[in-house]
């Protein structure tokens, strides 16, 4: 059974690319600035959400590639 992306949340990114860009900005911000502990914790939580979103999207794409490799061309439904 193919894996699907998690249920959308109010802060879910529009796409894999936007999630990755936000994650990169978040990491740069956390690495370069002196932030209060609460801000760092919130940044870590958001980063974990973004990472989960990206992994879920990659899992869906990997499943589709495997199906194509096996000659089982099936319609792709966007999980978002």
Image (cartoon, grey):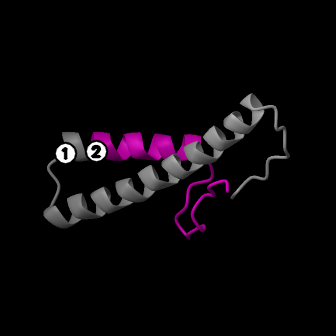
Marks counted in the figure total 2
Q: Which secondary structure lies at badge 1?
A: loop
Q: Quadrant of the C terminus?
A: bottom right
x%, y% of residue 30?
24, 47
Asked whether, in this view, residue 46 is left or right of residue 80, the answer is left
x%, y% of residue 33?
19, 45
Task: Give the number of the disc on residue 6.
Answer: none
Say which residue label 2 marks: 29
The 10 Å Cα crowd at callout 1, few under 14, some 14 to 19, many 20 or more, is: few
Q: Is 19 covered by the magenta stretch?
A: yes
Q: Quadrant of the N terminus?
A: bottom right
Say which residue label 1 marks: 33
User: Which of the two residues, 35 or 45, is positioned nearer the viewer here?
Assistant: 45
Q: Give the residue displayed 15% in from the left and 63% down from the top.
A: 37
x%, y% of residue 6?
57, 63
Rendered position, 65 above or below 75: above
Asked whether, in this view, residue 62 is left or right of residue 47, the answer is right
Q: Is 5 covered by the magenta stretch?
A: yes
Q: Are marks 1 and 2 in contact (CB under 8 Å)?
A: yes
User: Which of the two residues, 10 or 67, is positioned nearer the viewer here?
Assistant: 67
Q: Which secondary structure lies at badge 2?
A: helix
CA gap between label 1 and label 2 equals 6 Å
Give the quarter of the image for residue 45: bottom left
Residue found at the very far front of the displayed protein: 70
The 10 Å Cα crowd at callout 2, few under 14, some 14 to 19, many 20 or more, is: some
x%, y% of residue 8?
60, 67
Q: Give the residue displayed 63% in from the left and 58% down from the top.
A: 4
Q: Give the residue displayed 75% in from the left and 32% down from the top.
A: 70
Q: Which residues are magenta?
A: 1-29
Asked whether, in this view, residue 56 is left or right of residue 42, the answer is right
Rendered position, 6 above or below 55: below
């Amino acid at each position: 059974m193919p894996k699907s992306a998690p249920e959308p949340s109010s802060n879910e990114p529009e796409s894999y690319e936007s999630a990755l860009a936000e994650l990169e900005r978040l990491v740069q911000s956390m690495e370069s600035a002196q932030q209060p502990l609460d801000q760092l914790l919130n940044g870590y939580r958001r980063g974990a959400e973004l990472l989960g979103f990206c992994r879920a999207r990659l899992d869906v794409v990997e499943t589709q590639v495997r199906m194509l490799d096996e000659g089982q061309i099936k319609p792709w439904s966007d999980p978002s």
